[in-house]
Amino acid sequence: MNPEPYLQLDRVIHEKGRLAIMSMLAASPELSFTELRDALAMTDGNLTTHIKALQQEGYLAVAKSYQNNRPLTTCSLTAAGRKAFAGYISLLEQIVRQNKPR
Amino acid sequence: MDNNWAVENLSTIRTLMERSALYRRALAPIMLFAGIVGVIAAAVGLHWHVDSAQAFTLLWLVTALLTVAGAFFITRKQALKDNEPFWSPPTRRVALALCPPLTAGLMLGVFFGLGSLARFIDFTVLLPFLWAFLYGCALHAAGFFMPRGVRLFGWVYIVSASIALGYVLLVQPNFEFDGHWLMGLFFGGLHLSYGSYLYLTEKKNPGV
């Protein structure tokens, strides 16, 4: 088996929590911090840590605003994030294909 | 090397992406629609004195059917607008979670409201409470795949039906009321209140 695709997998995205965040955001223009937290059943601290890691990598943009006089934090994927996510998916598909019994 | 993890990862990604789409479905129009239908049904029941258990049950079962059909239509319209599949696995999960309590409510209506016992006992005072309890359970179950507010809304039904039932049975046993008032309050008023709240607070979809 060719281990190449596995070695190429983006380690930042490959972590379970971060992969879940990227997946949710890949299907939405943006999601609020609360929506992500509730959908993924994460704690505030856990989600913040993952968001920071993705932000540092340039995959995720965070915007702070106000809605009905309450602070609203929204997250969205950057162009680099979308590209990295698409690359991650195609590597996964490659791994599945090359291990398929013929 | 085993590649099951890769298959599982791809499946998880797909589920989460579809779930994300569910999160973007606007609930306000559905809740407002359900509320308006509930209020109209209560008004019809009160105005035309739909008092017999059979007529009462039929009116509210038809109302429930109309509401479910309307909710499906609105959700489908939103999915088509967003170029997303309507009958996706998360939508199926929500429908499956709603099914058992709603089926139990339907069966209670059929057996208690339309069955032979209805000739001897007036179930129109009991059915609104039972339906509110079961609807609350249905919302709570479906809420595991939807925004947290839906689960809380389920609790609102269970708590308000408990308070109303406790008041009628324990505090004021002689309190007389019309089942249509209760149904209008539970299925009209509560939906309208939650729908209005969502309408004012739901985030508008950017770029969609």
Image (cartoon, grey):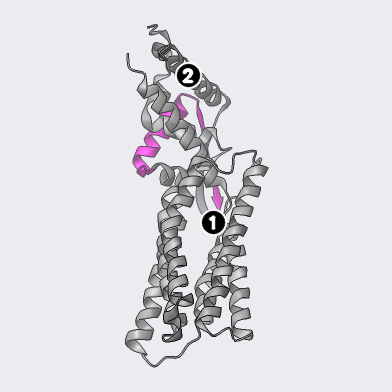
Q: Which residue is mark 2?
A: A93
| Residue closest to the eye, A64 or A42 | A42
Residue A7 seen in the current view: yes
The relative height of residue A41 versus residue B129 in the rendered view (above or below) is above
Q: Quadrant of the image for the C terminus of chain B? A: top right
> How far across and down, in percent of the image, does residue B111 sit?
43, 72
The kind of residue tagged 1 is: Asn
Q: Which residue is mark 1?
A: A69
* Extreme residue in the front direction: B116
> How far across and down, in percent of the image, does residue A58 sit?
50, 25
Residue at x 36% of width, y 22% of height: B4
> How far across and down, in percent of the image, does residue A20 sit?
43, 33
Residue at x 45% of width, y 76% of height: B115
| Residue closest to the eye, B79 or B112 | B112
Residue B32 disc label = none
Residue A74 seen in the current view: no
| Residue closest to the eye, A50 or B205 | B205
State yes or no: residue B108 in magenta: no
